[in-house]
Image: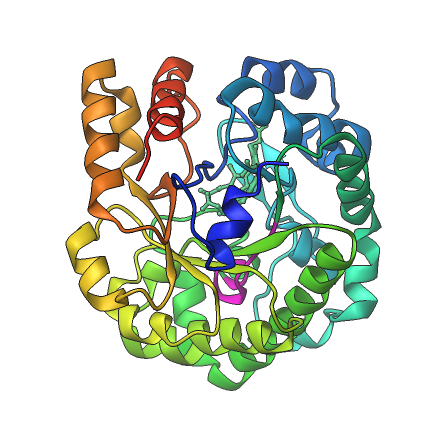
Amino acid sequence: MNTLLLDVLDGKQVERPPIWLMRQAGRILPQYRKVRAGMGSFVDLVKNPEKAAEVTIQPVDELGVDAAILFSDILVIPECMGLEYHLVKNKGPVFPKTINDPGDIDQLIHGEIATKNLGYVYNTIGEIKNRLDRVPLIGFSGAPWTLFCYMLEGEGSKTFSKARRFLYQHPEASHKLMDKLAVSVAEYLKSQLENGVDCVQIFDSWAGMLGQDLYKEFGIKYIEQILSTLPTGTRTIVFSKGASSSFGELLNLDCKALGFDWSYRPSEINSVVKGRKVVQGNLDPCVLYGDEKTIKEKTLQLLTSFDEKHIVNLGHGVYPDTPLDGVKTFVNTVKSYRY
Ligand code: 1CP
């Protein structure tokens, strides 16, 4: 087994950094589009352990990345708590029912009672582990704030102003919902670990929508709560996109690695992190649209900017129309690099 990712997270020396890509399983791969076309809906695919395992493994075969990430979605948490979602073509996720007032929060189930409905995810992990022993498997969840965004808005948004407005109008109810989410996410991640994932990433994709004070009160606090309930020694990666104003607070989280988007300069990351965390990131996903020479140059620049506590990744998920050749150039450049 290629243990590069686990070795870096465990603080061991490696000959080169591991690489995986956020959103590597999915629409960039023709193999994925074929499986997806044969399924009724995205949610059907997520709930089918056999097929979800298949698309989890596809990028390991096709791209040669150093880790697999469980094929699922962050939105399974709102669903198991009582808000179902659909995926609408050319639009994204849509929730027919949303949280509109504090009373709606009391209706939601949470914790183990909710996450026990996610047996299909745990079965997918078992299926992947039966078929894949070449590289580690990353489990994941959305962070409470990002899940809160979808539960309030009912869909993606440019401003998430309904979600942000609710924090000011109903702070107590907001804390209640964040706590319900944090308890559920912690249970969910614990179950993923019990079923065999080797490490977990918490995605806070919309962290950058909140200013420093609100992110501290409603975002970081609940990531901290989740991390504090995971078994000691769990390999954890926290990715808070756009949260550079909270850099100092993120650094105090009890996690093994922090993910960075491409707005950070590597020298700035190094000077603040000072080896206290493994650093994951942070190539601009748009570099992969460049020609081969540009991709190689930018990748080498990234590789030489960080020391040996680095997991190579993009600064956010790979965009669906990224040329596969560009992705492969990125991966192969990293794989032939040596410290
Ligand atoms: O077939 C399709 O068209 C479905 C597109 C798709 C896929 C492939 C969605 C809908 N989700 C997924 C899988 C997924 N989602 C994975 C596993 C695959 C992998 O990473 O390799 C993961 C980790 C996610 C996580 C996820 N879902 C996030 C956090 C990461 C990020 O990119 O910031 C978010 C915000 C979502 C919500 C979501 N689900 C799907 C879409 C298109 C979105 C984003 C919507 C928006 O922009 O608001």
Relative to 125, say whether 277 is above or below: below
Query: Residue 240: percent from the left, percent from the top?
Result: 39, 59
Query: Residue 336: percent from the left, percent from the top?
Result: 36, 25
Q: Is residue 305 left or right of residue 58?
A: left
Task: Give the tally of numbered discs.
Answer: 0
Work out whether residue 47 can be spotted: no
Between 115 and 306, the residue placed more toward the observer is 306
Q: Is residue 70 left or right of residue 5?
A: right
Q: Is residue 143 magenta?
A: yes
Q: Is residue 213 magenta?
A: no
Relative to 227, say whether 328 is above or below: above
Q: Is residue 195 left or right of residue 13?
A: right
Query: Residue 64: percent from the left, percent from the top?
Result: 52, 24
- What is the image's colouring? rainbow
Quarter of the image where one finds residue 326 = top left
Query: Which residue: 52% across, 75% down?
Result: 222
Query: Residue 152: percent from the left, percent from the top?
Result: 53, 61
The quadrant of the picture occupied by the C terminus is top left
Query: Which residue: 31% across, 62% down?
Result: 243
Work out whether residue 250 can be spotted: yes
Between 307 and 150, the residue placed more toward the observer is 307
Query: Which residue: 49% across, 27% down?
Result: 90
Q: Residue reaching furthest bottom? A: 172
The quadrant of the picture occupied by the N terminus is top right
Query: Which residue: 23% across, 32% down?
Result: 300
Q: Which residues are magenta?
A: 139-148
